[in-house]
């Protein structure tokens, strides 16, 4: 972990390298699509909505998305021990 903090600092490498590194670390995880989808939706909302309303809408959409994911996991894996994006 210390190597990552030392060599992948913002001022030492470009943003594209950091993104590629993060995606390559999580390639084995099937649930990365949920994180990517939520990020794209929230970024699109931030880009195209006006400030003042945007903050509330992004919060509600992000929480609703995670709530749906968590409810789905509770319905189909109730009592099971799985670690996923919902915790």
Image: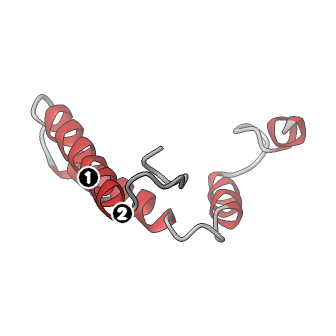
Q: Report if the CB atoms under discs 2 and 1 are less than 8 Å apart.
A: yes
- Sort mark 2 into few (<14), some (14-19) or many (20+) by Cα contacts within 10 Å: few
Q: Which mark is residue 65?
A: 1
Q: Position of residue 40 (x, y in %)?
A: 34, 59
Camera-nearest residue between 27 and 45: 27
Q: Which residue is at a point 73% across and 37% down the rendered structure image?
A: 11
Q: Quadrant of residue 55?
A: top left
Q: Which residue is at a point 22% across and 41% down the rendered structure image?
A: 58
- Dot 2 corresponds to which residue? 37
Q: Which mark is residue 10?
A: none
26 displayed left or right of 67:
right
Instruction: Please tell me whether mark 2 or mark 1 is closer to you in this view.
Output: 1
45 displayed left or right of 72:
left
Q: Secondary structure at mark 2?
A: helix
Q: Quadrant of residue 72?
A: bottom left
- Sort mark 1 into few (<14), some (14-19) or many (20+) by Cα contacts within 10 Å: some
In the depicted structure, whether residue 84 falls above or below residue 63: below
65 displayed left or right of 32:
left
């Amino acid at each position: 972990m210390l190597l990552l903090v030392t060599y992948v600092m913002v001022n030492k490498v470009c943003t594209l390298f950091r993104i590629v590194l993060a995606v390559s670390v999580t390639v084995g995880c099937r649930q990365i699509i949920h994180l990517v989808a939520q990020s794209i939706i929230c970024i699109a909302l931030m880009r195209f909505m006006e400030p003042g309303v945007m903050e509330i809408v992004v919060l509600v959409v992000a929480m609703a998305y995670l709530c749906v994911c968590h409810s789905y996991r509770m319905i189909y894996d109730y009592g099971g021990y799985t670690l996923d994006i919902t915790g």
